[in-house]
Image: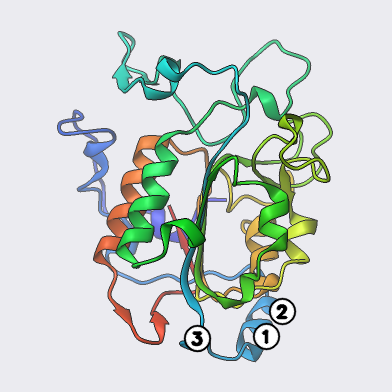
Amino acid sequence: MLPIGALITSPFELGEDSGGLFSRYKEAPFLIRKYSVAQLPSVSALTALRRVEPGTDLRKAFLGIGDPVFNREVSLEEKLKGPETGNSGQVAMRGLPLKRRSAPSDVGRDSLNIEDLPQLPDTTEEVVSIAMVLKANLEEDVFLGDRATEGNIKDLDLSNRKVIMFATHGLVPGELDGLDQPALALTNPAYGLDQNNDGLLTVDEVLNLSLNADWVVLSACNTGAGDGDGAEAISGLGRAFFYAGTRALLVTNWPVETTSARLLTTSLFEKVTYTKYGVALPSCSHA
């Protein structure tokens, strides 16, 4: 599960955080600083990628999905509350313990469902910022809140998008009741918005999508994780998106802190150089 690029090339001691979350890692001698590393989930995925025809300029630049509605009982004050740091040194987000883009850490509970997932309002800023960088149409190309439903995603023509982004919770098997495969959390259907679906875009459902994307960004927890214990990395959601028709992925191997995830993805798109043929990117990137 440890990406090769995260190995260090020489002895290194972490200092004090000075200038933001996890700032002490900035100078670590990671292998990725010396070598570009591409990773594929399988040999068959490499074969499939080589058969994919290059994208055309007729495709739209972007599709962004973020800030799904999980629980309408969350107050506006809670949604808008800014980041804090608790006395223990743990990161606190909007009054909650370390807010990660995965299932809630409610220990001692026997049952967890989609309504138990914490809201991620900062993903609105994340998706909109990237849409603006790519000069996308905010009304047609950005699906937030009530529009971030499983049904809307399945009804869209996803084959005409160069970059597709999901900014939400990433779930691994067992994190929610009845969940037996990796999934992305979308808007809770309990509010009458999407009664024909369960609000979870699972591996099996991703495989049924028809993509023609240069890049899919999964700004969520554990999206590079395997199908289960002992499985190879990227064997879950990552492999599914490859087979659905994307040429490159940005995924995460572990739970991610939501503010850091937003800063990473938005700054990445601000710095990437685009050509008229799309984005020149490696086959798979890890955060």
Residue 82 is left or right of residue 77, and the answer is left
Q: Which label's residue is closer to the chain start, 3 or 2? A: 2
Residue topped by disc 1: 47
Q: Which label's residue is closer to the chain start, 1 or 3? A: 1
- In this orientation, which residue lies closer to the viewer: 141 or 94? 141
Residue topped by disc 2: 44
Q: Does 219 sit above or below residue 106?
A: below
Q: Does 34 sit above or below residue 105?
A: below
Dots 2 and 1: beta carbons under 8 Å?
yes
Amino acid found under the numbered disc labelled 3: Leu
Amino acid found under the numbered disc labelled 1: Thr
Position in image of residue 286 (x %, y %): 46, 57
Q: Helix, strand, or loop for circle 3?
A: loop
What crowding class fits label 3: few (fewer than 14 Cα within 10 Å), some (14-19), or many (20 or more)? few
Amino acid found under the numbered disc labelled 2: Ser
Outermost residue on the front side: it is 139
CA gap, disc 1 to disc 3?
25 Å
CA gap, disc 3 to disc 2?
28 Å
Q: Does 29 sit above or below residue 118?
A: below
Residue 140 seen from this side: yes
Position in image of residue 175 (x %, y %): 71, 32
Please give the name of the residue rendered at 72% of the width and 60% of the height, measured from the top-left corner: 154
User: Which mark's residue is nearer the viewer, 1 or 3?
Assistant: 3
Residue topped by disc 3: 58
**Among the 4 quarters of the image, the one containing residue 102:** top right
The structure's colour scheme is rainbow
Q: Helix, strand, or loop for circle 1?
A: helix
